[in-house]
Image: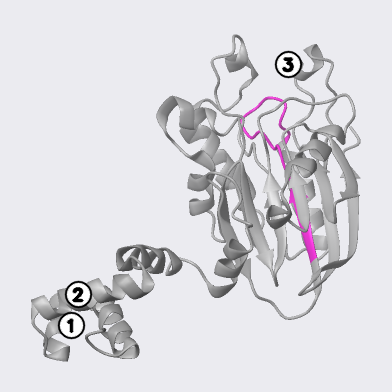
Amino acid sequence: MALVDDKRLVEIVNFSLEYGDNRTCETYDLKQESLARYKREYKKLFGNFERRKIIDKIASNYSEDELKAIAAGSMGGLGSRKHVVEREGRHVKFGVLTDTHIGSIYFRPELLTEALETFDREGCEFITHSGDVTEGMSTRPGHIYELDKLGYTQQRDYAVELLSEWSGKIYMIDGNHDRWFVKSSGAYIVEDIAGRLPDAVYLGQDEGDLIINNVIIKLWHGEDGSSYATSYRLQKLIESLSGGTKPHVLIAGHTHKQGYFFDRNIHVVSGGSIQLQSKWMRGKRLSAHSGYHIIDMEITDDGVTRFRVEWFPFFL
């Protein structure tokens, strides 16, 4: 038999979870032993209240829409985050960058400037960047000779300087080159860059989700190799996604290849690169599709109803 009615029991225990035992005893004129009995009764009826306390603490870090996305299974991978945007209207237009490799001798700053100017001229609301913002520094023999910005600080500051030319939102993840700094010194350079830009959002390591009116745009990088067929790598990724984890749009980096296809109700864009073909890529007989995209889409609460993607190659 319960010590008090269920509604009163829940009220008292929830109050104690939020404000602590001492304040609860004072507010409800209880002794510590009585409160302990209420908590035991609560556990019998509703389960472990400590687990509830942990869940409530986790939930406090997310919006209602983010919690709905988590409940739907769209958690993303390790190190990923979500950023939810509620906006009026159903038309979304944005610029797509990936694999800038700032700090590499094969990176051309004027090409990035051209992309940012085009995004502004075409009326893009925001930019996404699917990783390898910087070139990083590896232990690969000869790699140091492919750098014109040496070390974490030089690459970070140069990236901030160049990306500051864009005055709107930038949503970013890191890539395997950026994570060389993580492996060598535990430094998250893309998160640092985003924190130094006026309106940038870091979405996580290797992947992250941008959610606009329930439409999920996933940025993804990966560390696997390229493939003979441009779409094969991403087709295998799409096949691996379970139903609850599928985004509406996937924008991928890493391979420096551009392309678009539609599979399992996902609009898939391979982002190309800003960096030109490197000596390492040429040695591996890998071409680089250098350029950028603009995506123009119509959305509803149920998904994407119209999707247009335009590729802007660099002609050098």
Q: Which residue is mark 2?
A: 20
Identify the secondary structure beneath mark 3: helix
Q: Residue at x 78, y 49 (%)?
A: 115
Q: Residue at x 72, y 81 (%)?
A: 88
Q: Give percent across and percent down for residue 13.
A: 27, 79
- Name the amino acid type tagged 2: Gly
User: How was this image coloured?
Assistant: one colour
Q: Which residue is mark 3?
A: 280
Q: Camera-side residue: 55 or 13?
A: 13
Number of residues whose C-alpha sits closer than 10 Å to that of mark 2, classed few (under 14), some (14–19) or many (20 or more)? few
Number of residues whose C-alpha sits closer than 10 Å to that of mark 3, classed few (under 14), some (14–19) or many (20 or more)? few
- Name the amino acid type tagged 3: Trp
Question: Magenta residues?
Answer: 93-108
- Name the amino acid type tagged 1: Thr
Q: Residue at x 91, y 36 (%)?
A: 315
Disc sitting over residue 24 in the figure:
1
Identify the secondary structure beneath mark 1: helix
Q: Residue at x 16, y 78 (%)?
A: 35
